[in-house]
Amino acid sequence: MSSVYRNEPETRDAWWAEIRQEIKSHAKALGCHAVVGYSESTSICEEVCILSASGTAAVLNPRFLQDGTMEGCLEQRIEEASPPGCGFCHIPYDELNMPFPAHLTYCYNCRKQKVPDVLFTTIDLPVEAIVIGKGCLIQARLCRLKKKAQAEANATSISNLLPFMEYEVHTQLMNKLKLRGMNALFGLRIQITVGENMLMGLASATGVYLAALPTPGGIQIAGKTPNDGTYEQHISHMQKKINDTIAKNKELYEINPPELPEEIIGSPIPEPRQRSRLLRSQSESSDEVTELDLSHGKKDAFVLEIDDTDAMEDVHSLLTDVPPPSGFYSCNTEIMPGINNWTPEIQMFTAVRVSRLSNINLTNQTLNKNFNDLCENLLKSLYFKLRSMVPCCLCHVNFTVALPEDELVQIAVTAVAITFDKNQALQANKAPTEKSQQRASTDNEEQLQFPLELCSDPLASQPFSPAKEALEGASSHTGIPAAQRAASLDKASPLTEGYLRHRSVPSCTNSTVSVVKMTPLSFLPGAKITKYLGIINMFFIRETTSLREEGGVSGFLHAFIAEVFAMVRAHVAALGGNAVVSYIMKQCVFMENPNKNQAQCLINVSGDAVIFVRESELEMLPVQPSTVVSQPTSSAGDVTT
């Protein structure tokens, strides 16, 4: 990451070129010739812009490359075909000339190649990966105060903070991964947001237990003042809580790796430190390290050294993450690892929460606590509103943090809830009953914003879950009571379902209209995409001079996002599509002036318009159905500005 203060396009292009070159250099140092899962992002505040890029270094199979050119150092790595299920875990570099200290062991699957003890990636979990148990969403949250400055001085101070923030975020991710008894992260996305007087970091990933990697060790707490009896008792109590939490998480996520008959011995490391350690301070000597009797392999433990108040706050933060309620799972990848029996029941949602921080006695500790509580409460509210879909999983959970104004924090999350059957597979739930079809027709008619005289043939796509469509739409909060937040979501549901696509026939009586589905996934469970109609990229701006009369910030944002959903659906229906996949809200910029009762918001969304057919309907369709483009009878009403 880098921060830059320049206005010339040539300067910005030069910075991006430098960052991309640095990414390539890192990949080459790791013995890789490709970077997958690559992304670039920016965060702008006044005259300062933070440029960041991330990706996963990889070695691609030459059979799938057109040019077939490879680096000489990689030829020996691709001579043999990698074993299925574990080949992507094998190290691409030479273990005798490693680019950084690491603890390597033989692969627990093939016993031939070496693997690291932990794996961080920005890609989704490969389909051939062997996973034990289920995955879970892991987040690292961090806030840091900074002094207000101008121009170059501001950019310099931010640049000095970035390496420490990256280290702290990595520390949290590693600790929380160990706390859940897992050994790999997928879909890692790190966002650093800059404001006038603070920096915020949010990292999201999906933790899993890969069978090819060694069993992760526990977390050991080491204190600085061993002579203090009360302090030692407190450390012992915290150690017990951590051990109990690890045991509960293994049971919760069904992590039960098979016992190996013999210990797999790792490769020697050219450095004296052979133990994985996570330290807050580097002031200790190497002699103090040797006093910790930690063996390698399964018993290897991370050491959290409690040397100051910040370190104690980090330990407490590990234990404040509350697991999802029973029947809920969450991940930021497209599919939850360990769950395969998905049903066609999907439910996309977008929630926005705005919170104003008090500037009285504002410290890094209070900022971190407020930020952590804000994210946790947002997740809890989602679980509460989707409780009728249990058992279900929140997939592709995408958090976005913004600091639109001084002391104003905005968090937006988009995800899709997918139900799964614990006892039956997807194929067992393909045929819908007559009763559910009648209920679908009734619910869709009630959810129309205005009456439409629409007809569709019996082969038209049925809605996946019309009863639960009431939850799909917008959800925005600003600290209002939970009951009011839940009610506001239900009230806006008719607006979100107002635009529909149909395939009409000359005349029909009892018709069923399908709602245009929206999902951030690249696919629809239990359905086949038959045609891609093109990309959707839309900008919306809404402002109001009667903010309080429209329900405050929560009501204004809620109605606006619901209207965005309705207009996206209308646009896709006009193109002849019946679904939007890979949906993403790229921007949500909100600004308010409470004194003048004014607010305005800009939203940018994109996705792919498609035509899909249920797999259960493919047998009923002898030929590809022709698409009839239907126009709505009237346009949506404008929000009063």
Image (tube, rainbow, N blue to C red):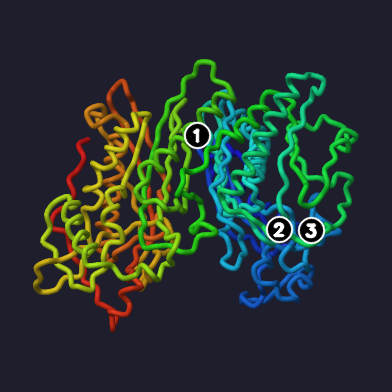
Mark seen at residue 545: none
Q: On the rendered structure, is 109 left or right of 563?
A: right
Q: Is residue 303 visible?
A: yes
Q: Quadrant of the N terminus?
A: top right
Residue identified by numbered label 2: 213
x 29%, y 28%: residue? 598
User: Residue 271: x and y, percent?
Assistant: 88, 47
Among the 4 quarters of the image, the one containing residue 5? top right
x 75%, y 38%: residue? 303
User: Residue 53: x and y, percent?
Assistant: 59, 49
Q: Nearer the viewer, residue 217 or 106?
A: 217
Identify whether 62 is placed above or below 412: below
Residue identified by numbered label 1: 45
Q: Earlier in the sequence, mark 1 or mark 3?
A: 1
Among the 4 quarters of the image, the one containing residue 116? bottom right
Residue identified by numbered label 3: 105
User: Residue 333: x and y, percent?
Assistant: 51, 55
Which residue type carries mark 3?
Answer: Thr
CA gap between label 1 and label 3 equals 45 Å
x 51%, y 57%: residue? 336
Which residue type carries mark 2?
Answer: Leu
Which residue type carries mark 1?
Answer: Cys
Label 3 residue SS: strand
Label 1 residue SS: strand
Label 2 residue SS: loop
Total numbered labels:
3
Q: Earlier in the sequence, mark 1 or mark 2?
A: 1
User: Residue 395: x and y, percent?
Assistant: 46, 53
Among the 4 quarters of the image, the one containing residue 428? bottom left
Q: On the rendered structure, is 481 left or right of 434?
A: right
Q: Earlier in the sequence, mark 3 or mark 2?
A: 3
Identify whether 253 is placed above or below 225: below
